[in-house]
Image (cartoon, rainbow, N blue to C red):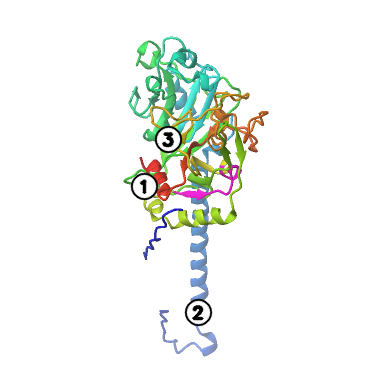
Amino acid sequence: MFRKKKKQEETSNETISEEKEVPSSFSVAEKKPSRFPLFIKVVSAILAIASIGLVAYSCFLLISDSNDSLSDESYITLTGKNINESKQVYSRFGKEKMKKASDFALIGTKLFLSETKITPELLSSEHTSDILGQGNSNFYLYNLTTDTSKFASGQSHFESNQFYIDLGKINEGDYLVYSDYYNSVDSENLNPYSLSTNEAISYTTYSLPDPETKTRKRITIKNNNSSPFLVISVKNCGSVLPTNVYDAVIFYASYQQGEDGSFSEIENSKEDIDKLSQLVSDNSDFSKANLKVKVAGSLQEAYDMKCSYSFALAKDVKTTTSLYTKGNTDYLTNTLKDTSLKGYDANPEIREMTGYLGCAGENRIGVTGNQTHIKDSSHTGKESYLLGETLDVLDTIKTFLTK
């Protein structure tokens, strides 16, 4: 089974009374009143003022960290700028490509865009013009905070079969997406993308912790009809993830592929799932790297979790990843050879976790494991892997998450 690691524990961690002489002209009944009630009133007033200040500060924090709760059609302002100042920044750019990105998806922190619908067949350098438009070779980010275009971490690499921009690798700031029409770097000749859909979107994801500082970035993607462009906002957000958000989910594979290529559902015992949960809980390497990892009891539970990475464990398999995020890695991909999802990822533990791009939960006839229940339509998904169940599999997962 797995190699169990010993859990490491960490340790951290007058009342003054003043007597005054009573003047002889006063009787005992005429004694000066005590100042104690006045002291109580003063303290009460101070506490009341402090409480009001605390409530006001709490409201400020709630508002400053809840941009996603604003109306979907609110004008998208840039960090530290009001509407008029944001409009002035947007006006510096051309608008030729407004409303031309007809399809998009976010897998983990990887952003996919296309001027046509994204399908497995489209992911080829031969179809660059279909994705980007004639005369373009890559997607790029324009850093509005530093007025920087065409920087290494902010682009796709079609020539290496990387058809996405990895937003987890960019620095804090506000960004627009553009393609390299005529290789121009002048803002007036750049034509940032907006989405052709009428749907207002606001998706938030989080980067993995920095290996050295252990801090993360909060990445929000916004687009609506009230604003001219798709805007990506990246903010440093400390080291702690929200309560219901994780870096990764780990679960046992629910399906097994036979020699004929077909899949059959398999049962995983509660005892094995509990044992895996304990092993993950005891693994001090995750906590040392500030990784927040959770074990799920089923594919459906794993799908419902909010996280960027998904790791399914199965016996006697080689490391397999999604055809969408394979890029220039050496990991295997496994695709369906027939059915209406021919060409898509075959393993349900990868395809369904991919979400929108994997046609998850569509109940396609003859496609085993395509019945994931999707509560709402979302263009988000997880970067997914199928790993062999070995003694050092948790070390392998940690390596994935700290690369």
Query: Is 155 displayed left or right of 374 in the figure?
Result: left
Q: Which residue is mark 3?
A: 234
Q: Which residue is mark 2?
A: 34
The one of 165 and 241 positioned closer to us in this rendering: 165
Q: Which residue is mark 1?
A: 214
Please report the residue visible at 49 percent of the width from the left and 37 percent of the height from the top. Answer: 384
269 drawn magenta: no
Q: What amino acid is found at the position of numbered circle 2 in the picture?
A: Ser
Q: Find residue 32 and report its horizontal and vertical position in percent.
A: 49, 81
Q: What amino acid is found at the position of numbered circle 1 in the picture?
A: Lys
Please report the residue visible at 51 percent of the width from the left and 79 percent of the height from the top. Answer: 33
Sequence order check, earlier mark of 3 and 2: 2
Please report the residue visible at 42 percent of the width from the left and 81 percent of the height from the top. Answer: 17
The one of 33 and 164 positioned closer to us in this rendering: 164
298 drawn magenta: yes
Sequence order check, earlier mark of 2 and 1: 2
Mark 2: which secondary structure? Answer: loop
Evaluate whether residue 79 shows in this view: no
Mark 1: which secondary structure? Answer: loop
Q: CA distance from mark 3 to mark 2?
A: 59 Å
Residue extent of the magenta highlight = 292-302
